[in-house]
Image (cartoon, rainbow, N blue to C red):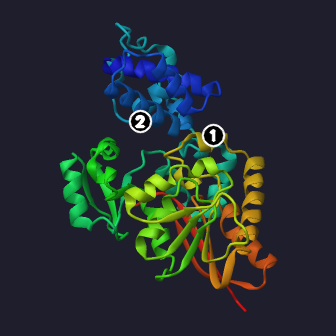
Amino acid sequence: MTPAARVAAAIGVLDDCLSGTPVEKALLRWSRGSRFAGSKDRAAVRDHVFDGWRRRRSAAHDGRAETGRGIMIGCLRQQGTDIDALFTGQGHAPAPLGPDDGRGEEGATEAVRHDLPDWLWDRFRADLGPDAGDAAQALRDRAPVFLRINPRRGDAATALRALAKDGVEAVAHPQVEGALQVLHGARAVSRGRAYAEGLVELQDAASQAAMARLPLRDGQSVLDYCAGGGGKALALAARARIDVTAHDISAARMRDIPARAERAGVRIAVAPQLEGQRADLVLVDAPCSGSGTWRRDPDGKWRLTPDRLAELARLQAGLIDKAALHVAPGGSLAYATCSVLAEENDAQVAAFLDRAPGWALCDRMQRLPGPEGDGFFLARFERSG
């Protein structure tokens, strides 16, 4: 495919997204119908689509239409691309630019410039204050790729050498010990030996920082109450000789944990049901809006509604209360989200402390999305009596 044909394909996918199809499903539908597209073509179209979908509002404004074509024109303009060289109408290229494709008029609202729905921009400003703009802007760009070094398999020098042999260039994270940022070759990580042999795992630096912040000691028991695919359970199990149990309401989400644990050289028990089990540390990585990770999943910010946010908050409160029942005497409870919204973070902490006067907040961390990682929130409680 030519560069222009890739843009034309992205326009079609974006139109599918605008009709209500989730972005991943729209890309899969295009890929299945475009068997001629090679791996580089599919990667390029995917990048175009995600770039445009992250910047849906501002790109549509700059392209003068909330259509796939308008979004792609606006996005390419923001990137400084020579649009006339792509929109030629020749072969499979998009039609040439016309009078209706002129630049958007001045006067875009703050919400449009920050690529958020109006109500969410209001929440960002209320919750994040002077940091709202930087956080929203970070969500408009591609996310960096971070890896976690698995100390059970090797150290940083070993990991960097192995990654280099796999064609992956990475450097140590400036703030998070054991984290690497991939500079080149990100798509080669999952195909390389370093990943296959458990030397590194894909995990955002903010999530790594949160897991490293939780105090652990050999012989301790840990329950990951909303384990999902087990990424955080793996990070904890790699740090100390502890007994880790993964639990999730959906057993299907945990199906890959045994294989991942074996690759990482750690032991994680998978427990679809908990029979009164207690642990020294219980982690609740709660379902949330994902607002700290929307650059990875831009569908999230366009699909979230105030009602859905309120529903998530009710779910989170219930999970905290249920998880607290599994904390052993003298143990601690950790609550985490990948959200930047106060309703899911500090408001949940305050509400739990009001409902459970026997608990006290002993640690809190909030990271906003930026070059060093995604947005992430962590609060740790201990019994006060």
Query: How many numbered marks appear?
Result: 2
* SS class, disc 1: helix
State which tag comes first along the sequence, 1 or 2: 2
Mark sitting on residue 246: none
Q: Nearer the viewer, mark 1 or mark 2?
A: 1
Q: Residue at x 57, y 36 (%)?
A: 57
* SS class, disc 2: helix
Q: Residue at x 49, y 80 (%)?
A: 216
Mark sitting on residue 78: 2
Q: Is residue 241 above or below residue 28?
A: below
The quarter in which the N terminus is drawn is top left
Q: Nearer the viewer, residue 126 or 9?
A: 9
- Occupied quadrant, residue 303: top right
145 displayed left or right of 160: right
Q: How far across and down, in percent of the image, does residue 373 sit?
A: 43, 59
Residue assigned mark 1: 302
Q: Amino acid at mark 2?
A: Gln
Q: Is residue 12 above or below residue 179?
A: above
Q: How far across and down, in percent of the image, does residue 314 sit?
A: 78, 59
